Image (cartoon, grey):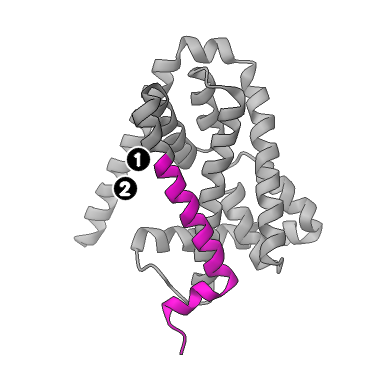
Amino acid sequence: MKTKHSFFKHKEGQILILGLTLLGCFFILLLLSALFFPNYLQVMLSITATNIIFGRISGLSIGIASQMDTTLLIAFNIFIESIMVLILYPLFVLSWNKLYLISYKPLNQFLERSKESAHKYEPVIKRYGVVGLFFFVLTPFAMTGPVVASFVGFLIGFRHHVTLLVVLSSTLIAIIIWFYLIKNFEEILIAYSDILMMGFLVAATIMLVWYLFKKYFYSRK
């Protein structure tokens, strides 16, 4: 019988270790920013939060509004999205094989919803193969993007390295494309940068309160 520790001897476990290592580097980066570049810390936290909750377009908008260096902004966004893929992808594969490493209800619910989305898009992407997966990542709609794309790549039978290579390379291209599209509105974003950040913060707070309310309400039924 396999133990949880044996998972790390397989490809999924190695990918997860890489993702967790990058996550550790992310926290070190935040610590160094807090010590030496405090002005960047708030921007980086805002970009991270908006990217995770609302998607890359929101994260890039925050960075452009804050007049963050172009190379740094693009690199930071691909860094964030790579971490998400390299952690959630192996967890998805393990959960698909009924090998749960983490018994955390919100995470398990997210993976279940993602399975439904992956199954929904699987036939279309399977028809076009790597090209279909590539363009799926470029699509800025709900429940698309690199994380769900990596799940679809697994479902249609791509090898781990093929899935990750296609997903992460297309993610980088998507970030660059959206950066230059949003760049056209730079003056507007800069003028309303404080309102923009406050708006995303309020929206995120409302979503969190609604989630906690639903969780409390349904748990009492």
Quadrant in which residue 89 is drawn? bottom right
Give the label on residue 174, or none: none
Secondary structure beneath dot 2 equals helix
Q: Residue at x 43, y 77 (%)?
A: 5
Q: Residue at x 55, y 42 (%)?
A: 79
Going by the numbered disc 2, the residue's amino acid type is: Tyr
For the residues marked 2 and 1, what is the alpha-carbon distance in whole angstroms?
6 Å
Q: Is residue 115 visible?
A: no
Magenta residues, start to end? 1-28
Percent of width and height locating residue 24:
43, 50
Quadrant of the drawing holding the C terminus? bottom left
Q: Residue at x 79, y 51 (%)?
A: 131
Percent of width and height locating residue 12:
56, 68
Percent of width and height locating residue 1:
46, 90
Quadrant in which residue 139 is drawn? top right
Q: Is residue 154 visible?
A: yes
- Identify residue for label 1: 207
Quick one: 121 or 90, which is closer to the camera?
A: 90
Q: Are marks 2 and 1 in contact (CB under 8 Å)?
A: yes
Give the label on residue 211, or none: 2
- Residue furthest to the bottom: 1
Secondary structure beneath dot 1 equals helix
169 relative to 129, above or below: above
Quadrant in which residue 140 is drawn? top right
Q: Reply yes or no: does residue 16 show up in magenta.
A: yes
109 relative to 196, above or below: below
